[in-house]
Amino acid sequence: MKTIDEYLDEQINEQLCQAVLSGSKGEGPSKAKIRPVEIKGQVIYQVSETVGTKVLHRNYHREELIQYLKEGLQHHFSQLQSSGMTLDGTVLVSKKGKVTIKTRRHPGNAQNQSTSGKDKPAQTGEKKQILAHNRVKQYILKENTPVPFLVDLGVMNKEGRIITQKYDKFRQINRFLEFIQDILPKLDQQKEVTILDFGCGKSYLTFAMYYYLRELKGYDVNIIGLDLKTDVIEKCNGLAVKYGYEKLHFYQGDIADYEGVSSVDMVVTLHACDTATDYALAKAVEWGAKVILSVPCCQHEVNRQIKNDTLEPILKYGILKERMSALLTDGIRANLLESMGYETQILEFIDMEHTPKNLLIRAVKTGNKRKMDDAAELMNALHIRPTLEKLLYPEGEVHSEN
């Protein structure tokens, strides 16, 4: 007989059509309907709770919905009925807490539904459309597969289930690993690959990078994490020893002054504040890094410098000036990296709904240097000179002062 965990893991996926929680125990909502919907190109599960005369709507990711259903059956409801394209099921919870699960498979459900009733064909078509365009995300680090560092860092429990409040972090980690996956051809698997992570913080992504490259892909990696916080560094080193990650080391130090290596293969800088990102990028260029992955944060420098009479009607609004300055900062950084022989892209790191700091600069060294004429003209027009330009062109070859 299936457990509730096994049943929900099998039922809650892209083939779910609808589920209903009912049999209220007197606390909370009297009923809750669940259906999959399309939001920003992915399946999200919309829950409609009936509370008195009101209907409240909430959206959940898959793991969040599974947790919601388990808690609902434990505290608020005695029955869950669900129907899917290939599986229907009923979960009953007795007053003494005994759980009974009944399932029925029907592989031909989507094709063999009766067409009696005017709206049934449309409903079937809608379900097929959702299925065609919104498959449940297949992550690099799998759900329900325990990963030691994710357990210790509070993202997973010991059974591998994602902690509801950490689901965004789990998605962020996997999104980052997708960027790593894309640049694997640039890393030599026949020799040791040196990677520096500036401003590593609690090192969710640093551990994920080591685990993915060394444990899953078999690369001989030497990863160095650098951060200013001594207590964080001590904790991360302790975890690295615990997992037997012999080539993962963390050091306390400043990005601008770090001289621990003479060359690197990849530089990662995530949420390094303001000009700390510029120093990290300049170091990466100095070391001839083959790959640079950078998620900038708190771009204040250009905001303090920018000045342009034509744009003044816009710049007088503080929030618009701040956002425009942030975008200009990263766009100029990308151009500067291109001028140093990097093919550069600016990509979405994580959905804007989760964090406004959602852009990633990915630069891959090609040796083909591009001219900075247009970018230099733009910087002149806006009266700005970013730190990265000063570091890469200390003699002012790119920028001519007005």
Image: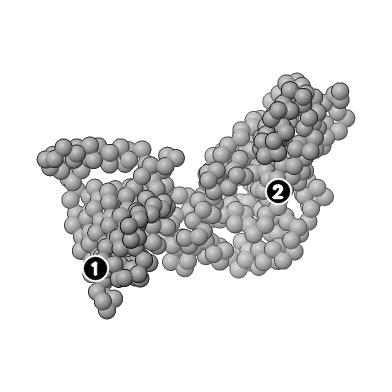
Quadrant holding the C terminus: top right
> Badge 1: few (under 14), some or many (20 or more) residues near its Cα, within 10 Å?
some
Badge 1 element: strand
> Badge 2: few (under 14), some or many (20 or more) residues near its Cα, within 10 Å?
many
Number of residue marks: 2
Tag of residue 272: 2
Give whichever of 54, 33 is nearer the camera: 54
State the residue at coordinates (61%, 51%): 220
Give whichever of 334, 297 is nearer the camera: 297
| Residue 292 seen by the camera | no
Q: In the image, residue 321 lies at what x, y percent? A: 70, 35
Q: Is residue 9 left or right of residue 345?
A: left
Q: Is residue 43 left or right of residue 102?
A: right
Q: CA distance from mark 1 to mark 2?
A: 51 Å
Give whichever of 234, 299 is nearer the camera: 299
Q: Is residue 101 above or below residue 94?
A: above
Q: In the image, residue 393 lies at what x, y percent? A: 83, 31
Tag of residue 92: 1
- Reading the chain from its start, which is encountered first: label 1 or label 2? 1
Q: Is residue 61 left or right of residue 378?
A: left
